Image (tube, helix red, strand yellow):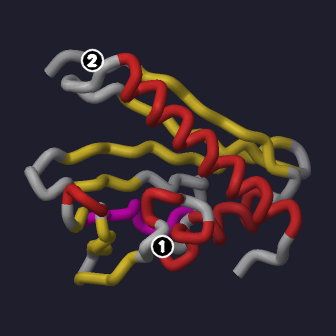
Amino acid sequence: MTTMPARIIHRTIRRDWRTVYAFAAKPENMPLWASGLASGLTRDGEDWIADGGPIGNVRVRFAPPNDFGVVDHTVTLPNGLVVENALRIVPNGDGCEVMFTLLRQPDMDDAAFESDAAHVTRDLEALVKLMEQETPR
């Protein structure tokens, strides 16, 4: 398999990394900031099921709870394609950095990649707003 082009999208959050991680790693909270999962997630064993809209239901598996700020997750599409999503919460002084590594999929054109990057950016900005202005769940 060829290495895919990647873009790291990040935002700074003025909140302790452990608080951000505890909120962001909880699948039940993801619909509050990750618009691709806005319809919610339903637990199915070790996985979670999300309504993928016109493509159908997608299966999501999250990294187990950890002390390193890793919120990685794989998304399995109805056609069997597995998309690896690397999401990290990294300490930065009294706050943290939230970083998502966006990989350009093999069949994705420039416009679709830019659209995905804009989507991730909006989601991370929503997380920043939640974490800096509200008490996390």
- Quadrant of res 63: bottom left
Viewer-side residue, 52 vs 132: 52
Up/down of 41 relative to 107, above or below = below
Left or right: 56, with 25 as reference point: left
Residue sitting at x 52%, y 53%: 70
Residue 36 location (% of width, % of height): 44, 57
Amino acid type, residue under disc 1 in the picture: Pro
* Outermost residue, front side: 54
Q: Residues within 10 Å of mark 2 (few under 14, many from 20)?
A: few
SS label for mark 1: helix
Q: Residues within 10 Å of mark 1 (few under 14, many from 20)?
A: some
Dot placed on the residue nearer the N-terminal end, 2 or 1: 2
Residue sitting at x 73%, y 42%: 97
- Quadrant of res 8: top right
SS label for mark 2: loop
Residue 21 location (% of width, % of height): 65, 62
Viewer-side residue, 21 vs 7: 7
Q: CA distance from mark 2 to mark 1?
A: 29 Å
State the residue position of label 1. Answer: 27
Left or right: 32, with 91 as reference point: left
Amino acid type, residue under disc 2 in the picture: Thr
* Residue 3 marker: 2
Residue 2 location (% of width, % of height): 19, 16
The magenta span reads: 59-66
